[in-house]
Amino acid sequence: MSKEKPSIPKGTRDFGPAVVAKRNYIFGVIRRTFEKFGYLPLETPAMEQLSVLTGKYGDEGDQLIFKVLNSGDFLSKTKQEDIEQGYKHLTRKISEKALRYDLTVPFARFVVMNRNEITFPFKRYQIQPVWRADRPQKGRYREFYQCDADVVGTNSLLCEAEIVQMINEVLTHLGLTDFTIKINHRGVLAGIAEAIGEKGREGEICVAIDKLDKIGREGVRKELLERGISEEAVGKLEPLYDLNGSSENKLEQLQSILGETPEGQRGLNDLRDVWTYLEGLQSKALTAQNESGEERLMLDVTLARGLSYYTGCIFEVKVNNVSMGSISGGGRYDNLTGMFGLPGVSGVGFSFGVDRIYDVLEELQLFPDSSQQSTRALIVQFDKEAEKYALPVLQQLRDAGISSEIYPEAAKLKKQMGYADQKSIPYVILIGSEEMASGKLKLRDMKQGEQQDLTVDEIIAKLK
Amino acid sequence: MSKEKPSIPKGTRDFGPAVVAKRNYIFGVIRRTFEKFGYLPLETPAMEQLSVLTGKYGDEGDQLIFKVLNSGDFLSKTKQEDIEQGYKHLTRKISEKALRYDLTVPFARFVVMNRNEITFPFKRYQIQPVWRADRPQKGRYREFYQCDADVVGTNSLLCEAEIVQMINEVLTHLGLTDFTIKINHRGVLAGIAEAIGEKGREGEICVAIDKLDKIGREGVRKELLERGISEEAVGKLEPLYDLNGSSENKLEQLQSILGETPEGQRGLNDLRDVWTYLEGLQSKALTAQNESGEERLMLDVTLARGLSYYTGCIFEVKVNNVSMGSISGGGRYDNLTGMFGLPGVSGVGFSFGVDRIYDVLEELQLFPDSSQQSTRALIVQFDKEAEKYALPVLQQLRDAGISSEIYPEAAKLKKQMGYADQKSIPYVILIGSEEMASGKLKLRDMKQGEQQDLTVDEIIAKLK
């Protein structure tokens, strides 16, 4: 047995009770919202076949997948050549399984494997950890949770509208008020490329304008030119950064610029439908404003987001006035299950970044007290006699659904009170000889520091 | 991209919505009970340092740990000799991390790493998956959940009594009535070994009598003799299989047999204390009987359970009249953190086997309807006009907290009804031209097949 000081792998975390409680509060709000909108839970295994994951995340992604060593004598089927060909080749010989890298590929795999049993449209949500061998840094972990909701098997833009609703409800329930839901459309981006005379080059354009926030207008211009976009095209593009007014206004301006391009027109039509659906749903995302007076739901033609994957609307959500990247995002894809040979399954999905939401709620002190509560009451005991008296009291409290404990030994009062304090237990019940004689127990409010003499029934009524 | 038919690793499972809902029902009952007794949640990473896990589960266990390949060029630091020395040696060179094998070792590791911040007694529960490279078979998986609760840092036998209470409450809440909580004590087993003249050999004796159910009295006799236990000792041991009457009665009989052995006396004293605590807690585990009229809480001197690990009371729970092994078990240990160089931390813990509980509840049809419900209401739509009418209705339902959906396209009625059926949605709301004119919508109860014309408010009142 190793007696060295134990540690955990870098980039992973233990979550103690207080943190688990807060995380569960966030998960609970997300889960209830997903379910209110008819999304149902799916859980897939932590390990997938390596062949299911390989080739889905690009070469760099493949390198970041955690591979699991075959069990037993994994060398029994390898030859000297396998080793000489280097680690990438050898990996395929000694590892058949790998840890889930995201929730999207396992979802696609599930849909393909169960396509004959699934009723479409299939609305599923999934809240599970994923693992990536990224270099750990502040806010980036090797194990972290994703919270995805996707609906596949329908083209209806009502789904996009409902995603806006869900984002708005979750963040509102979490107490956030100053956030912006940015929306754009792949067709709009393709239309812009065509309209500025660079048809088909929206990929390169997007990679560049995606950095607008970081490197500024001049930086983007430089990058666009380096990528071979013409001066003239860049000149036509730049006014689009400044589109302003309401999203309705922007749609009108874009109509005059992109109206002639089929892709642009498709994008504008889709976006208008999303707005119409949101009006039907009387969405508060349409009427709320952020603190600087802008619309909460904002059409942003510079929003690019993983172009290779999405084909329709795309979303991204930012909490304003905190230093934190986007906390949610998603979009529509046309061919999720194509990677497994099942074409034609269109869908739209999005994801919440729970670690980031957690940090934002901490920064803004938005966790409610109720998310931090543990045991409601601790019974402090002084001796065997008091312990005997206390046991049926304890049982009464628990039968009434009140989380409660008795300190398991007749330790010093200071130690028992310290335990309540450390565990943030809000009430302590003291039972001494006087209390046993009168039947009125001392209930101490740990926050206020006040004490009351109450019967068990009165205590239950108060704590319930 | 691979176009082959995707699959999942053997011994792992996808859980679709209906199964997740039922599993969450079980987890919910367990979690609420743990918390009612003052246990708080802990979560540890899926991956641990391989050195933390190695040597804790015996040689066979070490083989069953899933190892994770080092990321990047894992061969860069290996030499030809490392490969020639075989896979066990090579594993240590190319793998530093492994998947959690149980929740006990990570808990011990957490306690040691955080011993200066933790307030003892530390009551934690942990509900997370573990992974074992066991040969998969019916009821045995390579990925499965464990639900552990442990308290460390106190010797109080009240903890043992509360474990009996928690087991009793969880199983009762799940609707089980005919189950037996078996309890024994390591000291009693040691005392028996001494009393029959085989002091210190309780390990071998226990391995044999643990099989009493499977191989019968003759089989156990044969095995004991093979293990070198004397004929005389076996002769003295056998009457103990037949100890009968109430547990109190058994304690008395044992007192006369083991009273002289220090370990036996320690065990009997502890067991008596547990009973006294349970009486104080007015435990229903003491008063309830199983269907054949036996006590629910039963002292069973043939209960052995992982002797190498436990040092005090041991538990095991069996549901009667179903073909299923134990669904819960645990015990007291003296030296959990000794493996990491921190001696003297005593604790007691137990675990629920959720996969087995799931199968039992299925077999006995004990899952309540509420655990199977998904969306409460589906709005069926016929055309764009009805859709427009339906959207604010949908929003009203959701604002009232009712999980509801609208079918996202004006598909054929049969298809929409089939969707509700497949998803077990109990109510369907039909909106046609007549309904729009009158403001009374058709609410169809899918189970009863009945329809009612109701206003939105009436529908909300009914579904809430």
Image (cartoon, coloured by chain):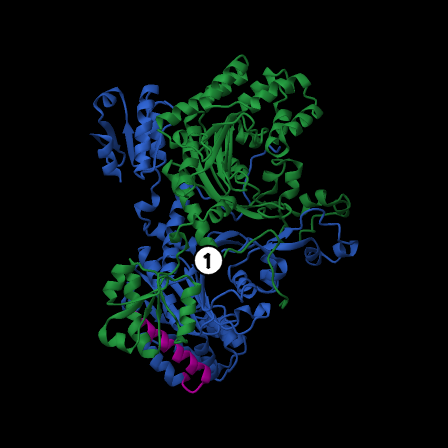
Chain colours: A green, B blue
Q: Position of residue B422 (x, y in %)?
A: 36, 34
Q: Is residue B44 above or below residue A254?
A: below
Q: Is residue A461 visible?
A: yes
Query: Which of B396 and B463 lies nearest the eye of the viewer?
Result: B396
Judging from the image, mark 1 belongs to the subunit labelled A
Magenta stretch containing residue A337, yes or no?
no
Q: Is residue A441 above or below residue B455?
A: below
| Quadrant where the image shows the C terminus of chain A | bottom left
Query: Which of B230 and B424 lies nearest the eye of the viewer?
Result: B424
Q: Position of residue A341 (x, y in %)?
A: 56, 30
Magenta stretch containing residue B268, yes or no?
yes
User: Does the magenta stretch mainly form a helix, a strand or a loop?
Assistant: helix
Q: Is residue B245 visible?
A: no
Q: Position of residue A80 (x, y in %)?
A: 77, 48
* Residue lying farthest to the front in this orientation: A292
What kind of residue is marked 1? Pro
| Mark 1 residue crowding within 10 angstroms, few (<14) / some (14–19) / many (20+) | many
Q: Is residue B60 left or right of residue B264?
A: right
Q: Is residue A353 left or right of residue A404?
A: right
Q: Residue placed at 40% from the left, 57% from the top? A: B324
Q: Residue placed at 31% from the left, 48% from the top? A: B368
Q: Residue placed at 67% from the left, 43% from the top? A: A92
Query: Which of B10 and B431 lies nearest the eye of the viewer?
Result: B431
Q: Which residue is mark 1?
A: A17
* Residue lying farthest to the top in this orientation: A260
Looking at the rendered structure, the secondary structure element under dot 1 is: helix
Q: Which image quarter: residue A424?
A: bottom left
Query: Which of A364 and B34 lies nearest the eye of the viewer?
Result: A364
Stretch of the chain drawn in magenta = B258-282
